[in-house]
Image (cartoon, helix red, strand yellow):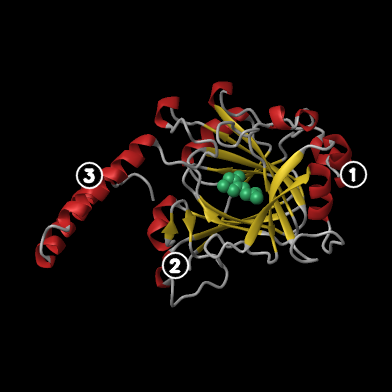
Amino acid sequence: MERQRVPHYTGVTRERFLQDVYPLRKPAVLKGIDLGPCVTKWTVDYLCQASGKKEVKVHVSTVPQMNFLSKNFVYRTLPFDVFVKRAAEIKHSDYFLSEDEKYYLRSLGDDPRKDIADLRKQFPFLADDIQIPEYFDKEQFFSSVFRISSEGLQLWTHYDIMDNFLIQVTGKKRVVLFSPRDAPYLYLSGTKSEVLDVDKPNMKKYPLFIKARRYECQLEAGDVLFIPALWFHNVTSEEFGVGVNVFWKQLPSEYYDKTDTYGNKDLTAASRAIQILDRALKTLEELPEEYRDFYGRRMALRIQEKTYSSNYE
Ligand SMILES: O=C(O)CCC(=O)C(=O)O
Ligand SMILES: [Fe+2]
């Protein structure tokens, strides 16, 4: 497998980001950005006392590597302060599944079916501590999401459909990324890759995975990772840590599915095209195998000719 380091940029201003980094449409680690007082203030004790008794729904897993296929994790609701204490400790005296279970919070809107995660709304007492780099227009803002995890926890490889700043406020993370172009090698199930172990993949089950080009970076407290829309990412917390990610709409609002509260529903035109393709495939089933094969190949070629862009490596 070919490997590549994600480039680091230090002290990037908005102007430089927009001119030199953003147009590349590749992940980048931005160092030395002023994130406000959160970097020193957000200790376990401070988070616990500032947050009060707000309840959060969290993932709880007996093993570090969460598996969306076997569903080896459960959802539980806890007061934020109890959750933070548990996520920060390795062995628990109070627990749901096992004394060394792992915790993960991806914060949600007040009504997750309708509302979008926004720290200013759900965590107003903490939102003032973080200065989110405003490298995009205010109208493009979509959501700000808490990402708080136990040491060791690994989130499966997935893509989101919006541009993203993953702000690592405290703790260390390892992020492995793959280009949208390598989707054919990732064995996708919806927005997620079935290759759960990106370090020791089952090569018998996933023989093409080795063809994917692996980008990797280490996030330290205070770093910001730019994740362009559609780039796959797999995140492992090497320490207990608090992150915040900000999604923003790089395209006009009309492109996005209005019912998307997570930032991971395909653009409406993409969903429609996939539906139409499914109908075309159903129609091909009317043909005998020999003909279905022939027209299937012709259609695949036509899709390639008409859609693949040549201008990116
Ligand atoms: O840092 C994490 O825990 C996951 C981040 C992520 O998936 C995102 O920012 O989209
Ligand atoms: Fe994500």
| Percent x, y of residue 184 | 37, 59
Q: Tag 1, which secondary structure?
A: helix
Q: Which numbered disc, 2 or 1, marks the residue closer to the eye?
A: 1
| Percent x, y of residue 179 | 46, 52
What number is the disc on residue 306? Answer: 3
Q: Is residue 109 above or below residue 137?
A: below
Q: Residue at x 82, y 62 (%)?
A: 90
Contact (CB < 8 A) between labels 3 and 2? no
Q: Residues within 10 Å of mark 1 (few under 14, many from 20)?
A: few
Question: Which residue is more in the foreground, 114 or 116?
Answer: 114
- Label 2 to label 1: alpha-carbon separation: 42 Å
Q: Tag 3, which secondary structure?
A: helix
Q: Which residue is mark 2?
A: 209
Q: Earlier in the sequence, mark 2 or mark 1?
A: 1
Residue 276 horizontal side relative to residue 157, left or right = left
Residue 225 horizontal side relative to residue 312, left or right = right
| Percent x, y of residue 240 | 77, 54
> In this rendering, does residue 269 appear at all?
yes
What number is the disc on residue 45? Answer: 1
Quarter holding residue 289: bottom left
Residue 59 horizontal side relative to residue 22, left or right = right
| Percent x, y of residue 32 | 72, 40
